[in-house]
Amino acid sequence: MEKGQTYQEIKPTKKLEELVHSFWMHRNASDTPEYKTIVPDGYFKIVFVVQDEKILRYFMTGLWIRENSIITPPKAINYGCRLKVLAPEFLIKQEVASLLQNFKDLDLSYLNLKHFDLSTFEKIVHQWQLELLKIQSQKTIPGNKLRLSQLLDGMNGNVTAKEVAEQVFWTNRQINRYMNKYLGVSLKKYLNIQKAYQSYIQIREGRFFPEKFYFDQAHFIREIKKHTGETPSKLHELKNDRFIQLKNIQRK
């Protein structure tokens, strides 16, 4: 395995960009287990864990709607693929609503993982993308669904459910039916997850008052605590010790 950075991220090829957000790698370089907390970010994931060139675990998660604790073994590396809202229908061809705040183990034959060259993150991503392209649906994504995904990805929650429906020319009821079927959450809930996640940037930088998205301070604190289990100030205090994403989330 490559040494150096404890976190890296690679964006997908253009052919996958409507369905895949990114590929990431996180390394626990220490000799002891690493205890961290994952917070909701609006993506479901395929993840595998490697230690001493061997795959310890391989699984798929649904969307997280609240914080979740994870443990990375000593000298192990987590590799993950973040998948967007259209990926259940147009990539993996299965719903992940049943995996909401949960996960399922995958067989190593899924996406041919058992034959991956695990020597570098770049090689892993290259192989992963080749396998995803093999299973990608050849159906054209309808315009309303494509607009929905692009709007959600571009606005980061800074839009109302009513505005989304108006801009993608799809009723709120239809959008909710689609998102509940494939992801297990309503449009409003999804937007709230995105809003909270984007707020972590300002929290990381020590700003604990709502700068956008929220009605007032009480609303801001309530929503952040709902998704992370902590108030904004406590989240900032624990950002380096516990909340792994706060160090790595980037402005768009």
Image (spheres, rainbow, N blue to C red):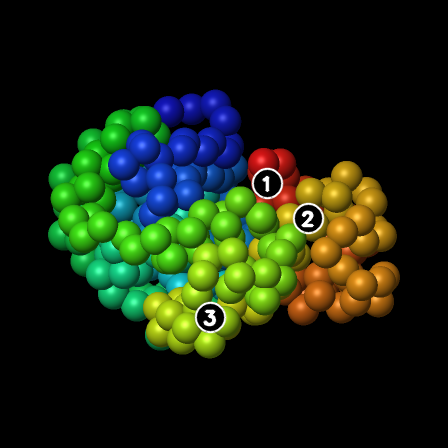
**Label 1 with label 2: CB-CB less than 8 Å:** yes
- Disc 3 is placed on an element classified as loop
Looking at the rendered image, the disc whose residue lies closer to the viewer, 1 or 3, is: 3
Q: Amino acid at mark 3?
A: Thr
Residue 55 screen position, x and y as percent: 27, 46
Residue 171 screen position, x and y as percent: 46, 70
Residue 156 disc label: none
Residue 242 screen position, x and y as percent: 64, 50
Check disc 2 and report the residue beneath it.
200
Of pointers 1 and 2, the one earlier in the residue sequence: 2
Check disc 3 and report the residue beneath it.
171
Q: Quadrant of the C terminus?
A: top right
Q: Amino acid at mark 2?
A: Tyr
Q: Residue at x 46, y 76 (%)?
A: 173
Front residue (pair 19, 130): 19
Specify few, some or many for label 2: CA neighbours under 10 Å numbering under 14, 14-19, or 20 or more.
Answer: many
In this rendering, is residue 6 above or below 213?
above
Check disc 1 and report the residue beneath it.
249
